[in-house]
Each structure stands twice: as C-alpha cells, then as structure tokens.
C-alpha cells in the first residue's frame, strides 16, 4: 500500500501507521481538534471528514466531521470498534487513491506548524505490573527478605488506580515532587524534594466503547475496547513511594505526573506485531484470563539527555493487555471512554533492557555513566528523558509509536 | 434564622442545611439540573437564579442560572469558595425573607416528585485511611504477625486512588462482585462470587476550585477547596482484597461500586460541627500537615435491613480532611473540580462504633444476629445497607447529611 504523499517507505508514520492525536495551530490556538499523522504532516481529520460527508462518501454512520471537531478523542472512542475500523479504512483510501489528492492536500499541515495536546480526556487511569523481570527486580530491591515475586503475581495481573488528572502530554515539564521519606536508619521521616526521582517505560492502552456497571469484558472481547496504544512514562519518586506504599499501595510517589505520547497508535496498526505470550503454563491461569491473549512486539528505547540507557522489549511481558482488561472488569467494574491503563514498567532479562533507573542502577548502587562523564543513580534537575517505540508493520514497514519526553524542573519550596 | 416554608425546627434539612444535589422530574427526565433541598422539597436552583438575575438581585458574578442548569455540580464547584459563599447567602435570603415567597414558591418541588442523580462528575477519587481504630483493627485481622498500625500511619494520612467511574448515587443496586480469592490453606486461588462482601462507612469530601499541576494546597487553604460532604459507602470484597492487595494496594476488591448520598452538604453548613482532633502529639506531624486542621463532629448510623448495627463517630478520626488534602497535593498533584476523597472507614473504640462488618464481626468469626433471627458475618444477596448522618447546627439545630443506601444483587455468572 502506498500513499500519494511523498513519504519515504521506511518512515515510521507511513500509510500503515495513521495514529490519532489532538492538535491546534497558531492562528486558532483554541480550536483543538483531532488530527491524523502521516509522514511529517498532520491531516485535519474533521475538515476532510466534512468533505467526505458533503460528497456522500460516507454512509449513515456517525458524522465524523462533528466527532473529530472536538478537543479530545473521547467522542471518537465512544463510537466503538466498528466505527474505528470504518474510519481507518476511509482514511487509508483517501490517502492512497490519487483521486482524493486535490481535496485532501489542502488539509495536510506540516508538523512544525501544529501544537499537540493530550489526546484523551483520561477517565480512570490504572497501572499494571505485567513484566516478570520488573516485578522480580523491584521485589528484590524493596522486599529483600521475601520471595522476589509476590505469591499472587502469576495468578492475576496486579494493578492499581493512578491519578487521571495528572496525566500530561509529551513535552510537559515535570516539577520534582516533594514528600516524606524515611531511610531504614532514620528515626523519623523527613520532608523534602525527592532524591530518588525515576522513570518507568511503559505502554498505555486507550479504552473506548463504554460498558455498563455489573458487566464484564472477556479476553476475547477486549480488542473491541482497546482502541490504541501510547508510550507512557510513569514518573516515580522511589523514596516517597517506599515510605508510603504499605499497606494501600503507591500514592504520592506516582501521582505528581504521568507522561504520554501525543499520537495514539490504533490497535489495527499493530496486527503484524501480535506475538504469543512468553508463557503462562506454570501455574496455568484461571479460565477468565484465557483466550486470545496476544502480546505486542513493540521495541522501546529510553534516552537520558540524548544517550540511550535502555532498550526494553514489550514482547517479553508476562500478561497481555487483553488479560489486563478482562481482569479489570471481571468484578463488574464499568469502562468509560477515555479510560487508560498502563502495562507497568517494561523490563527484560538483561540489564540493558530494564525500564527504570531503580533497576538499571539497582536502587542507585550502580550508577550509570553518561557520555558527558557525569553519573546518575536517579534523575537530576534539568535531565530530559525521552522514550521512543516502534513495532513491525506489513511488508517490513515500521509502525512508529512516536515519543514521550519530559524535563525535570526543580522542586517548589514550601512557603514559609 | 427561620424560613417562610413550613419546616419543623428539628428538621434535618432546615434553613441551616441547604445541601446541593442534581435532580430531574418525571415530565422532563433528561433535564438534570442543580437543586437545593429544604425540608421535604427541592428548590429548582437555576429557575430561581434566573428570576434573581432578571430582577437585578445578583451582581456581576457568574450567572448561577446557567451554572445550575447543568447535570452535575462541577460547574458550580469550578467557581470556588467566594462564589459558594455568595450563593449560600443568597439562597438563605430568598428562603427567609417573606418578600421573595411569591417568586420562589412555584419552584419548590415535593421530594417525592423528583429523581436524584449522582451530584458530581467524579474526577479523581481518593480514599484515605484516617481512623486509628479502623487501621488498627484491619492490621490485626489482615496482618496478625505485624504491629497493628503500619510504621508510617501516624506520620501521614495514608491514601490511594480508587475508581471514579464506579461511584454511584444512593439507591443504586450493587451486583455482588466476582474475583479471585485464596484462603491460607488453599493450594491455588479459586474464582467465584465474593463470599466476604462488606461495607465501609465513610464521609466523602467534594473538591472544587481546581489547581495547577506543580502547586500545593496547605492545611489552612484546604477549606477553599473542600466544597462539601457526602456520606460514602465504600463497598469492599474482603476475600478479593486480601489476595490481591500486596504489594500495590486494593483494586478489584473495591472498584466495583462506591455509593454516595445524593445531597452534598456545604462545608459552610458544618461550622458548628468543627472540633479539635483527638490528638497528634506523639509523634508530632511534619510542618506541612500543621495548621487549622479541624475535625467534624458528624454522627453516622449504619443499618442492615433496617436494624441499626453501628454508630460510628467521625469526631474521633485521627486525620482531618484539610490534612488529607494538603497531603494529597504536597507532591504537586493538581486538583480538578469534582475530585472526591473519602475519610476511610469511620470506626471508634467500641464494637458498636465500628464502620465495617470486617471489624463488627471480626472477619466473620463473631457474626451479628439480626432482629429476624438470622446472622451475618458478611452481606447476603438481598441485603440492604443504609447509612445516615447528622451534625450539630446553630442553636441546637441538626444538619442532616441525608442517607446512602444500596441493596445487594446476586453475582452475574461467567458465560460458558
């Protein structure tokens, strides 16, 4: 499949990717609307949908020109899987069939002339813990006297709710959080800026097709509710987290910021990336977690101040996104359009594939040396962390998942 | 202060209460709008605000007729403390000064002719753990080999994020959740309907006056962001919770439903109910948790199938709502209009003041006997739990906080 646009065959945002986002332009900064990225352009989706509607190209379905002229993807997410598929097929047609070129071309805006925004109004945000290597590393670091994996870990995808209101789009600065910490030798906790500020490299799954309270989504039905994927950096203050998290879980150590990429890659763009899970034979999982529980072969790269520090492989995750969604709803919890759930830190068996500094530096005891000669146990003020990702596409193409980046700003002192 | 309405002096919804909610009427079921309860009537708030506006009664502030003609309190919450105070003063004036009677009376609707709805679009929901007796009881039951209170408990108000999308209004049935559980002697977890379905009697604090990410709300500033109070029942499946909650906290054991009362009692109605905290001298709390951290003398009553089973006293809570909000934001987490945070289960030192069946029956080992001769360790299908609450008002009046009630429906089987 080729587009009439001048996009190199190996471009990560070629015709097989077509991710959705929300953008505005300088001449109308308040007019946030849905865009589709192709090459180094953003297609003004509502504008072309209006042309299609007026030309009778689209049937009796929902009016995408209206749905896409909104400041988040949530209205589109509400339409559900059949509408998502039709929309993608239509976008593919108008970008490949030369007959549409004259109509569409005026609505392609160069990437450097748009501002991207948070693509979804996040409803509920849940973070899972699906990498065996990550959970095992964290267990050894935080709970050295216990087994590396908690007893429940291979029976259910452990997850918890995070703060939806502090999910921010790539490029947003992150203010170093302050809070309580207490070292094992400290007689009492102290208050101050976090001294163990960390990252977590994850994928985030964007949910649509709301469900009713009391109902469930099975593993096989999950693909009807997983619209797409973002890269997600779950910033973590390890010192705050370590002191607060027993018994009710992480709270302020995570709630100050969670960054996501601007472009939501449709699950339909990741068909070639579906892989088998690495294994759930011992122990076998309960029937409600069985079904078409594919993994995703997404390659992540984590850079700190421009130097690659890790290459986590999502294909190695123990639990699949469909299993996470089935678990999340098995108690009857409803889904809302704009729900977001994270995979948890993606860490592999090698040091170079660990998705957090906690693991890469073994809680700061084995600092990284950066190209400028400086060393890092955890993040310093001014540090910039960038995560990128890609997956295999049809015919050897690459599906780009974009990037999520953020720079650490100094802590805000308490007022006197 | 007396109203021209025929409301008995000891009515819990007298002129000193004036709580806000969202209602509709049978002739316009889609027209959900803000109402104010007085006696056994609901004042159509946007209708009277429109009269006030057209009569020039209100100044240059926000147009409350528009703000209140919306299906949640969120737009009103966004206005912040000064507007809340002005609105309450104006409502008090039109309900006490007889000159307004003719204009206002047509907009009073008998309570039995309205349907109440969830009063807020819940943004983020956080649940705290602020009762020392509750935390100590739970610690003894769930972690008998450890100290009753975790080491961090008296240093910070422990909290975690819950599921905002499953907060429901009083009267909503609750479907018994299913999930994994594993007794200490079971070789592997089993799946099925929860057999330890429980309640938690709490107050919920409704937040308005959104703040920016990276900023903080101090203890003294918290009253500008706590709009009001609801009664909250944090339904809990103890068997699911016990198996899942280590290490990341409660998830499916809590996320299936959280019920709140329909009427949000303004914090301004609870001035007479402010009390000192029972004590935070040993250990002293860190400076960011100090300030005007009043407690609230709210009396809660919990009934099971009509029989009172507990009378929890909110005045005994160790941590105050202002401290909870200061802690929640000390890391820079932003607030959104419609954020909701719960006190955690309100339990006192006596058996009869414990706010959960877990504690009342000591994890089912000391069942309650109901008036019909049946006994309960935990909830059975068909059981109805009702919580009511009141607080002292001016001149010996009672401020009613309404009620939150819900009935347990049978679990939904997994499809074959």
Image (cartoon, coloured by chain):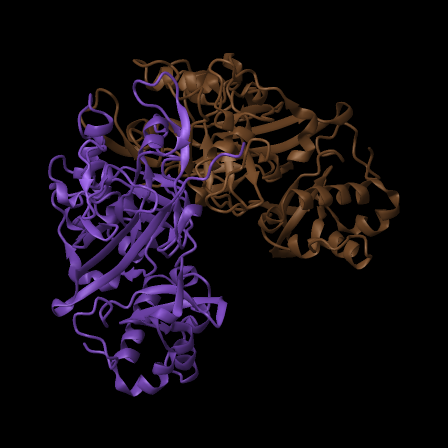
Chain colours: A brown, B purple
Outermost residue, front direction? B373
Residue A167 in picture, x, y percent from top left? 48, 41
Residue A85 in picture, x, y percent from top left? 70, 41
As drawn, A246 above or below B56: above
Does the image show residue B211?
no
Does the image show residue B30?
yes
As drawn, A286 above or below B348: above
Outermost residue, right direction? A99
Residue B405 in picture, x, y percent from top left? 31, 53
Indicate the quadrant containing the N terminus of chain A: top left, top right, bottom left or bottom right.
top right
- What residue appears at the point 64 percent right and 36 percent down from the top-left corner? A265
As drawn, B187 above or below B174: above
Residue B336 in picture, x, y percent from top left? 41, 51
Left or right, A267 with respect to B363, comes to right
Which of the pair B138/B372 is nearer the observer?
A: B372
Which of the pair A323/B246 is nearer the observer?
A: A323
- What residue appears at the point 40 percent right and 83 percent down from the top-left corner? B56
Count of labels in the image: 0
Left or right, A14 with respect to B83, comes to right
Which of the pair A246/A222 is nearer the observer?
A: A222
């Amino acid at each position: 499949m080729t587009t009439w646009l001048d996009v190199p065959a190996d471009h990560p945002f070629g015709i097989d990717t077509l991710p959705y986002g929300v953008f505005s332009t300088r001449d109308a900064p308040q007019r946030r609307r849905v865009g589709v990225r192709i090459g180094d352009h953003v297609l003004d989706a509502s504008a072309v949908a209006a042309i299609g509607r007026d030309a009778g190209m689209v049937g009796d379905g929902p009016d995408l020109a209206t749905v896409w002229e909104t400041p988040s993807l949530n209205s589109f997410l509400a339409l559900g899987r059949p509408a998502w598929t039709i929309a993608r097929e239509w976008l593919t047609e108008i970008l490949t069939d030369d007959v549409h070129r004259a109509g569409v071309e005026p609505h392609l805006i160069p990437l450097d002339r748009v501002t991207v925004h948070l693509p979804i109004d996040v409803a509920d945000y849940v973070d899972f813990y699906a990498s065996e290597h990550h959970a095992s590393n964290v267990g050894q670091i935080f709970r050295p006297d216990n087994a590396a994996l908690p007893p429940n870990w291979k029976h259910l995808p452990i997850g918890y709710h995070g703060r939806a209101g502090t999910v921010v789009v790539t490029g947003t600065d992150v203010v170093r959080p302050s809070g309580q910490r207490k070292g094992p030798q400290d007689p009492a906790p102290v208050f101050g800026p976090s001294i163990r500020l960390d990252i977590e490299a994850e994928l985030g799954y964007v949910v649509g097709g709301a469900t009713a309270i009391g109902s469930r989504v099975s593993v096989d039905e999950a693909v009807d509710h997983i619209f797409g994927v973002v890269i997600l950096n779950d910033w973590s203050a390890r010192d705050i987290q370590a002191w607060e998290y027993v018994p009710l879980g992480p709270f302020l150590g995570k709630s100050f910021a969670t960054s996501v990429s601007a472009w939501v890659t449709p699950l339909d763009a990741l068909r070639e990336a579906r892989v088998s899970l690495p294994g759930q034979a011992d122990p076998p999982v309960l029937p409600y977690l069985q079904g078409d529980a594919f993994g995703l072969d997404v390659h992540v790269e984590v850079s700190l101040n421009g130097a690659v520090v890790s290459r986590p492989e999502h294909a190695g995750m123990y639990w699949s996104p469909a299993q996470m969604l089935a678990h999340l709803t098995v108690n009857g919890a409803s889904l809302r359009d704009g729900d977001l759930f994270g995979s948890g830190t993606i860490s592999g068996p090698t040091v170079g594939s660990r998705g957090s500094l906690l693991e890469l530096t073994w809680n700061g005891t084995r600092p990284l040396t950066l190209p400028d000669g400086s060393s890092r146990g955890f993040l310093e003020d001014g540090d910039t962390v960038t995560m990128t990702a890609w997956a295999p596409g049809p015919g050897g193409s690459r599906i780009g998942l974009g990037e999520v980046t953020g720079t650490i700003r100094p802590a805000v002192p308490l007022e006197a």
